[in-house]
Amino acid sequence: MALLMMQNAGAVTRPGTVISNTANAAFTFDGANLDSPSNAADVTVTEGSTPSQVRFFQYSPSGQGAVAKTAGPTGCRVGDAGEPFTPLANPTYPGGEVLDAAGSLNLVAARRFHQGEPIFVELTDLDQNLDASARDITQVT
């Protein structure tokens, strides 16, 4: 079983947005207060691409070396993009402990996993974070 976590980052300005900037210098010269605005500099936001980063984590029952992370809620969609997501059950750690994915879990970065052990996946892709206040959806193939 795999759970997907999305890491929030700053808000993204939409491509095509024009950002206009004008500087203003206020100063005193020979006893006179002067104000001198610059010309406007316009920049149009274009669509860029940043590399994505995927990290794999495993649950640490002892919490040793772990970072508290929230992994849920989780869901899976089978079929077309318009199909709804089916909520996934909370993962079960070997030995029978049910992990509350909506709560804080002690997770450690890992490269090796044991059969039946839940795998937690964190995807970071800054230019794909369309709404910093919401979880984004990604397609894994």
Image (tube, rainbow, N blue to C red):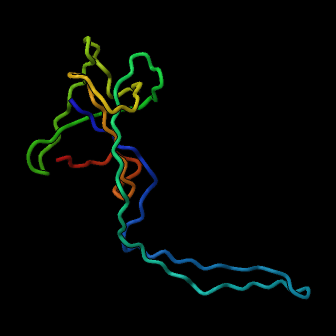
Please give left or right for residue 105 compared with residue 118 in the image. Answer: right
Which quadrant of the figure has residue 111?
A: top left
Outermost residue on the front side: it is: 112
Residue that appears at 31% across and 33% down? 120
Q: Where's residue 76, x and y in %?
A: 18, 38
Q: What residue is shown at x 67% (from left), y 84% (from top)?
A: 37
Give coordinates of residue 91: x percent, y percent: 25, 23
As displayed, is residue 46 above or below residue 119? below
Q: Residue at left 15%, top 43%?
A: 84
Say whether residue 25 is left or right of residue 46.
Answer: right
Q: 124 or 81, which is in the foreground?
A: 124
Residue 29, located in which quarter of the rendered image? Answer: bottom right
For image coordinates 45% across by 28% down, the residue present is 68
Toward the viewer: 28 or 55? Answer: 55
Q: Can you give x and y, in whole percent of width and height, for residue 90 in the image?
A: 25, 24
With respect to residue 75, does 40 lie above or below?
below
Side (left or right) of 41 relative to 56: right
